[in-house]
Image (spheres, rainbow, N blue to C red):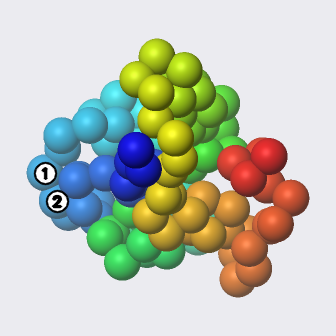
Amino acid sequence: MILDVVYNHTAEGNHLGPTFHFKGIDNPTYYRLVAEQPPLLFRYTGTGNTLNVRHPAGAGPDHGFAPLLASEMHVDGFRFDLASALARQLHDVDQLSSFFT
């Protein structure tokens, strides 16, 4: 079984959208913010927000949930939607990012 997962954004949209998930908890921890213009969120995914997997709290779902699904639910493989957004460094993709490891 192959599971299609989205670990790069949530349903919250941009800074003007409603709060469903992490925006109400700790916006700069869970989302990548535009440094010069917080609370604007990076749009690497086209959804209005990109999760901040550089922070341990933001990387938690990525690093903990997939192995659990593989071992407990017998998932054979994953297709990570827009995986390059998780390793984005300004204008480049860090191919040695902890996400890919």
Query: What residue lies at 18% left-to-right and 44% top-to-bottom?
Result: 19
Left or right of 71, for residue 101 = right
The residue at which mark 1 appears reads as: 18
Residue 31 in sight = no
* Image vertical order of residue 70 relative to residue 77, above or below: above
Query: What residue lies at 58% left-to-right and 27% top-to-bottom?
Result: 67
The residue at which mark 2 appears reads as: 17
Quarter that holds the N terminus? top left
Left or right of 78, for residue 11 = left
Residue 15 in sight = yes
Question: Which mark is drawn over residue 53?
Answer: none
Query: What residue lies at 56% left-to-right and 64% top-to-bottom?
Result: 83
Mark 1–mark 2 CB contact (< 8 Å): yes
Image coords of residue 78 (percent x, y): 50, 50
Image coords of residue 27 (percent x, y): 42, 42
Badge 1 crowding class, 10 Å Cα cut-off, few under 14, some 14 to 19, many 20 or more, is few
Query: What residue lies at 40% left-to-right and 23% top-to-bottom?
Result: 73
Query: Where is residue 25, by image quadrant?
Result: top left
Q: Amino acid at mark 2?
A: Gly
For numbered disc 2, what is the local secondary structure?
Answer: loop
Residue located farthest toward the right when viewing the structure as drawn: 96
* Image vertical order of residue 53 relative to residue 13, above or below: above
Left or right of 92, for residue 16 = left
